[in-house]
Image: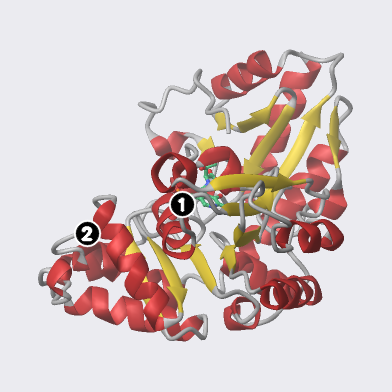
């Protein structure tokens, strides 16, 4: 995503209504307390008790045999793809997915994998007939073989849309039939779970491996998890070492991750409610377009009408009012609600946006 370069991030955060992302969330007091008290050891030797506890808890929550703590979602997706794929194989993914757009081409640059992007529907699904065709065995030596299928839920660039369980189940069956693993970028899987009213493991069961983040809506300062079958996670561990992600006394940050998973998942419903209020507020403003059917979780994707301000001017004017918003591309903008955003902040943001549009 285009980071709003006009943002002066040295502004004191408490005076800003920061809707650029849920990655801006600050650790909760319980997290800081847990971090201060964390029992630690050298995790590269497998001796950090807090990391081990986090990995066990994470694996259990998503119903997988094993899990590994990694520094970021990007590294989680990368190491999973490196673990699944062999050089020259294809990563079949959506043309709007995070792995393809925002991860610096890592699987290709570092793993020799070839991205095979498929068209993404507005709800974040990929047409299953296209998936089936992409997964088919190569006719001959001209074609790169399929290596791994990637799906994303909630879907970031589609505006936080949630993949239906029936869709995931069908995609997984197609992948299994083709003998190709399905990797789920579930950075916001707990948002998806809350929206569907299911446990995260009900989603994760339709993926061979998955990535999820502790550092977004769950408010941990750092860290993500890759989960899957034990032998595959052992390969991810090797790939994590390869890319320099082996950490030492990482229990200090893993402790916040444990709080994230035990205390912060249920409250995501509050973020979905504030996102809905925000979306409805924006939809009522002339000059903005919001597809309310796509506002399913904590992300509001909206468009600035071409006749109004240029997007960068709009974002800069909003910043003057203390409201930060992200830009997906061109006049497509994104506002994300999170732990640091109250219903009052949303009312204030809508009022500021109205003022800027009317000015
Ligand atoms: N997304 C960030 C930015 O990179 C765009 C954001 O602000 O939303 N998968 C998905 C679906 C993501 O949205 C993100 C982060 C990641 C993976 C990567 O996570 P990190 O930032 O921890 O590397």
292 in relation to 169, above or below = above
Would residue 255 appear left or right of 117 to someone viewing this image?
left
On residue 87, which mark appears?
1
- Residue 258 in the image: x percent, y percent? 35, 74
Residue 20 appears in the rendering: no
Sequence-earlier tag: 2 or 1: 1
Q: Specify few, some or many for label 1: CA neighbours under 10 Å numbering under 14, 14-19, or 20 or more.
A: some
What's the colour scheme? secondary structure
Location of residue 153 by image quarter: bottom right
- Residue 165 in the image: x percent, y percent? 75, 76
On residue 243, which mark appears?
none
- Residue 251 in the image: x percent, y percent? 20, 68
In-front residue for pair 8/311: 311
136 in relation to 353, above or below = below
Would residue 209 appear left or right of 349 to someone viewing this image?
left
Q: Which residue is drawn at 63% across and 22% down?
A: 315
Residue underneath mark 2: 246
In-front residue for pair 23/102: 102
Q: Specify few, some or many for label 2: CA neighbours under 10 Å numbering under 14, 14-19, or 20 or more.
A: some
């Amino acid at each position: 995503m285009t980071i709003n370069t006009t943002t002066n991030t040295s502004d004191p955060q408490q005076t800003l209504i920061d809707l650029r992302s849920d990655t801006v969330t600050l650790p909760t007091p319980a997290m800081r307390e847990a971090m201060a008290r964390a029992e630690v050891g050298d995790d590269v030797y497998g001796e950090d008790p807090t990391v081990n506890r986090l990995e066990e808890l994470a694996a259990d929550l998503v119903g997988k045999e094993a899990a590994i703590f990694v520094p970021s979602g990007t590294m989680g997706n990368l190491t999973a793809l490196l673990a699944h794929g062999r050089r020259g194989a294809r990563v079949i993914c959506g043309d709007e997915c995070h792995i393809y757009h925002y991860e610096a081409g890592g699987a290709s640059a570092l793993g020799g994998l070839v991205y095979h992007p498929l068209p993404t529907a507005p709800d974040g699904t990929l047409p299953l007939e296209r998936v089936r065709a992409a997964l088919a065995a190569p006719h001959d030596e001209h074609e790169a073989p399929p290596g791994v299928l990637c799906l994303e839920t909630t879907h970031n660039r589609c505006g936080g849309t949630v993949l239906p369980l029936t869709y995931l189940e069908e995609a997984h069956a197609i992948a299994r039939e083709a003998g190709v693993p399905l990797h789920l970028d579930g950075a916001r899987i707990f948002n998806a779970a809350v929206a569907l009213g299911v446990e995260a493991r009900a989603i994760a069961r339709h993926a061979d491996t998955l990535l999820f983040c502790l550092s977004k809506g769950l408010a941990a300062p750092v860290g993500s998890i890759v989960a899957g079958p034990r032998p595959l996670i052992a390969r991810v561990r090797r790939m994590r070492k390869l890319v320099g992600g082996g950490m030492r006394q990482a229990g200090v940050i893993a402790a916040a991750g444990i709080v994230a998973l035990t205390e912060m998942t249920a409250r995501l419903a509050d973020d979905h409610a504030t996102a809905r209020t925000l979306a409805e507020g924006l939809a009522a403003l002339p000059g903005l377009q919001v597809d309310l059917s796509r506002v399913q979780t904590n992300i509001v994707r909206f468009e600035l009408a071409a006749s109004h301000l240029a997007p960068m001017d709009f974002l800069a004017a909003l910043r003057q009012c203390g409201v930060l918003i992200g830009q997906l591309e061109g006049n497509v903008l994104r506002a994300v609600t999170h732990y640091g955003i109250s219903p009052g902040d949303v009312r204030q943001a809508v009022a500021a946006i109205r003022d800027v549009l009317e000015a």
